[in-house]
Amino acid sequence: MGISLVKGQKVDLTKGNAGLGRVIVGLGWDPADIEERGFFGMKKKTKANVDCDASAILLDERGKLTHADNLVCFYNKVSGCGSVVHSGDNLTGEGDGDDEQILVDLARVPASIHKVLVAVNIYECESRKQDFGMIRSAFIRIVNPANNQELIRFNLTDNYAGKTALIVGELYRHSGEWKFNAIGEGAHAAHINILASQYQ
């Protein structure tokens, strides 16, 4: 069992984990129960049908996204440098474990990249009138793929109702090592491109 983090906590990733060259960033969430009125005004509970998409934004030392291919998401699954790879889109979020995964080869991340920001958006949130209030049990975890050991877990417990994007956490360089920052901030961005544009 890895370290359980709280919002705002920063921990070492590579320091103390000798030989850690690659990590899996696992993200998970479940659709919340929503109440609907059925026949004769009877209330019934159903699961919200929300399609969440995980993304990674590779930022330079100024916190800027300098190349379009440094945005890794459902439509661009591999960064231009090849160090960050998206596992693919999960349309429902149902089931246990990670819903989406992003593999980060820390040893191959170019020296010009100082942060790998991890975010989640809701696909077509405006037309579907959806937000993160319809999601529960969201988490991010960092796993060592060499032995499947969970190193870090951050459960997002805030109320994100009305928010259409989540900045979940970031991997960042510090004194020659990699660290992780549990951010857990909600934002308004109907599409990952809108969120990414804030870093250009």
Image (cartoon, grey):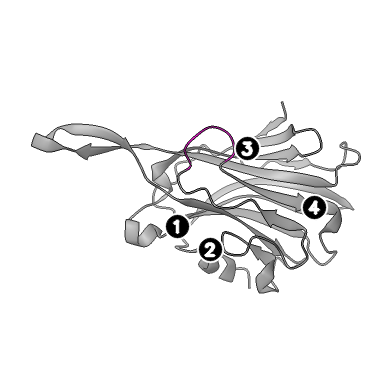
What's the distance in space between the residues labelled 2 and 4, CA to CA? Answer: 22 Å
Is label 1 in a helix, a strand or a loop? loop
86 sits to left or right of 45: right
Of the image marks 4 and 1, the number of the one nearer the N terminus: 4
What's the distance in space between the residues labelled 3 and 2, CA to CA? Answer: 22 Å
The quarter in which the C terminus is drawn is bottom right
Residue at numbered disc 4: 105
What's the distance in space between the residues labelled 1 and 3, CA to CA? Answer: 23 Å
In this rendering, the answer to whether 5 lies above or below 102 is above
Of the image marks 2 and 4, the number of the one nearer the N terminus: 4
The quarter in which the N terminus is drawn is top right
Q: In the image, which residues are magenta?
A: 93-98
Q: Residue furthest left?
A: 40
Foreground: disc 3 or disc 2: 2
Q: Within the magenta stretch, is there residue 200?
A: no
Amino acid type of the residue tagged 3 in the rendering? Phe
Q: In x, y percent, where is residue 197?
A: 57, 71
In depth, the one of 124 and 146 nearer the eye is 146
Report crowding for label 4: few under 14, some 14 to 19, many 20 or more residues within 10 A (C-alpha). some
Amino acid type of the residue tagged 1 in the rendering? Tyr
The disc at residue 123 is 1
Is label 2 in a helix, a strand or a loop? helix
Q: In x, y percent, where is residue 105?
A: 80, 52
Q: How many marks?
A: 4
Residue at numbered disc 3: 154
Amino acid type of the residue tagged 2 in the rendering? Ile
Amino acid type of the residue tagged 4 in the rendering? Asp
Foreground: disc 1 or disc 3: 1
Q: Main secondary structure of the magenta part?
A: loop
